[in-house]
């Protein structure tokens, strides 16, 4: 077992920061879930939330800056499409820590399941 997860490529950090910032909001996560069903108009999305169109637009801009959503303008309509590819770096980062913690927890389980020698016994 190693001492920690593999080092992170520093070049990935700004991308990771923007993705984790984007998915930190329940509204933005819900927008991503709705876009997983296919492209939607900004107005249609905004109508589903008890917040202003301006507030929804700010959430969408955060998703766009993280490259989780792309916008296509057709006349007066703004169509949004999910871009799940941007989640790959975040998923890879989480997998590093998943492996690290699984190894640590397995070692702890082994330690806890190992019977202790009787008191006063000599090896």
Image: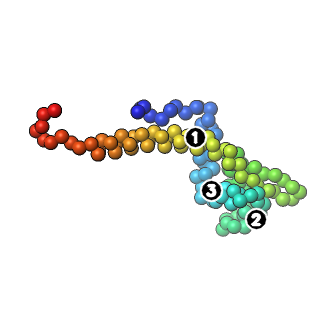
Q: CA distance from mark 3 to mark 1?
A: 19 Å
Instruction: Estimate the x, y position of residue 73 in percent, counting from the top left.
Output: 84, 53
Q: Residue at x 62, y 38 (%)?
A: 14
**Which color scheme is applied?**
rainbow
| In front: label 3 or label 1 | 1
- Earlier sequence position, callout 3 versus callout 1: 3
**Residue beneath label 2, please?**
44
- Earlier sequence position, callout 2 versus callout 1: 2
In the rendered image, the vertical position of residue 16 relative to residue 52, given as above or below: above
What is the crowding at mark 1: few (fewer than 14 residues within 10 Å), some, or many (at least 20)?
Answer: few
Q: Secondary structure at mark 2?
A: helix
Q: Foreground: 58 or 32?
A: 32
In the rendered image, the vertical position of residue 50 relative to residue 84, given as above or below: below
Q: Residue at x 66, y 68 (%)?
A: 50
Q: Quarter of the image for the C terminus: give it.
A: top left
Q: Is residue 44 left or right of residue 102?
A: right
- Earlier sequence position, callout 2 versus callout 3: 3
Q: CA distance from mark 2 to mark 1?
A: 33 Å
Q: Secondary structure at mark 1?
A: helix
**Residue beneath label 3, please?**
29
Q: CA distance from mark 2 to mark 3?
A: 16 Å
What is the crowding at mark 3: few (fewer than 14 residues within 10 Å), some, or many (at least 20)?
Answer: some
Instruction: Estimate the x, y position of residue 119 in percent, counting from the top left.
Output: 13, 41
């Amino acid at each position: 077992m190693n001492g920690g997860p593999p080092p992170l490529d520093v070049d990935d950090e700004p991308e990771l920061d923007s993705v984790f910032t984007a998915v930190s909001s329940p509204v933005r996560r819900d927008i991503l879930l709705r876009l997983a069903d296919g492209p939607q108009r900004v107005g249609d999305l905004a109508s589903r939330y008890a917040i202003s169109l301006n507030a929804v637009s700010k959430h969408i801009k955060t998703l766009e800056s993280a490259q989780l959503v792309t916008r296509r303008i057709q006349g007066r309509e703004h169509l949004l499409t999910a871009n799940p590819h941007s989640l790959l770096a975040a998923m890879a980062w989480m997998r590093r820590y998943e492996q690290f913690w699984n190894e640590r927890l397995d070692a702890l389980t082994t330690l806890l399941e190992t019977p202790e020698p009787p008191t006063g016994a000599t090896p």
